[in-house]
Image (tube, rainbow, N blue to C red):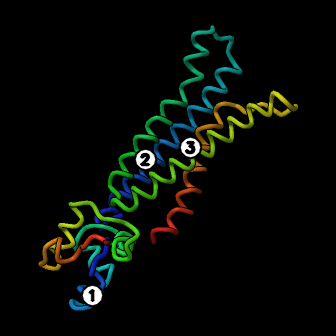
Amino acid sequence: MKNIIHILRAEKRLSQAALAEKVGVSRQAINAVETGKHDPSLALAFKIAHAFDKTIEDIFTMDP
Amino acid sequence: MGPSSTSEAKAYFGRMIFISILYTLSVIGVNLLDAAQDLSQPVRIGLSILPVIPAFFMLLAILAFVRSWDEVQQRILTEGALIGSALVGFGTFTYGWMQGAIDLPPIHASFILPMLILATWLSSVVIKRRYV
């Protein structure tokens, strides 16, 4: 699964640690999701989308 | 661990210190009683499994702490536990077969749990490098 978290973070000038605190996970978890090493649960995907005022589909897309 | 994990970590370490003290006292107490008294077989069996009780509470404390982690950390530990269990399982299984072929010293069964914990921890450290 691909995502645009790094772009959204850059737009909002948000560090991984700040986003992690916002969604209630570790910085390592945000890094793992952002780099595609971990596909987030639906709950975490919703929290990340909510943090950027976006929908899940805006942020996450399936790899072809 | 998430932002609320600091209080969870403090509670966990507090519980583990308390349980470790109970465990140490139970092991010392059991050995002293067993050596000093001429105890009946049922009492000896009861005393011998006494250290298992704090060890069980240790497991509950670990479980409560792990449940406070986020999904990536839980995934790392789950994979670590799986690989650690496989390593200890296959290791002791292989050792058991080798004992039939060559003269190897027996392994005390009480070493299995510490070996599982150590193997899980080591595996988790290696697996963590894949995710972070």
In 3D space, how far apart are the residues under numbered discs 2 and 1 (Cα atoms)? 37 Å
Pointer 2 indicates a residue of which chain? B
Q: Which residue is mark 2?
A: B62
Residue at horizontal 59 percent and vertical 57 percent from the top: B122
In percent of width and height, residue B121 lies at 55, 54
Pointer 1 indicates a residue of which chain? A
* Callouts 1 and 3 in the same chain: no
Question: SS at mark 2?
Answer: helix
Q: Amino acid at mark 1?
A: Ile
Res A16 → quadrant: bottom left
Tell us which disc is closer to us: 2 or 1. Answer: 1
Residue B5 left/right relative to B132: left
| The N terminus of chain B sits in image quarter | bottom left
Q: Amino acid at mark 2?
A: Ile
In 3D space, how far apart are the residues under numbered discs 2 and 3 (Cα atoms)? 17 Å
Residue at horizontal 33 percent and vertical 79 percent from the top: A17
Res B85 → quadrant: top right
Residue at horizontal 37 percent and vertical 72 percent from the top: A36
- Labels 2 & 1 near each other (Cβ < 8 A): no
Neighbourhood count class around disc 3 (C-alpha, 10 Å): few under 14, some 14–19, many 20 upward: many
In percent of width and height, residue A15 lies at 31, 85
Give the answer, above or below, for where B116 lies relative to B129: above
- Res B85 label: 3
Residue B63 left/right relative to B54: left
Q: Which residue is mark 1?
A: A7
- Labels 1 & 3 near each other (Cβ < 8 A): no
Question: SS at mark 1?
Answer: helix
Residue A62 left/right relative to B43: left
Pointer 3 indicates a residue of which chain? B
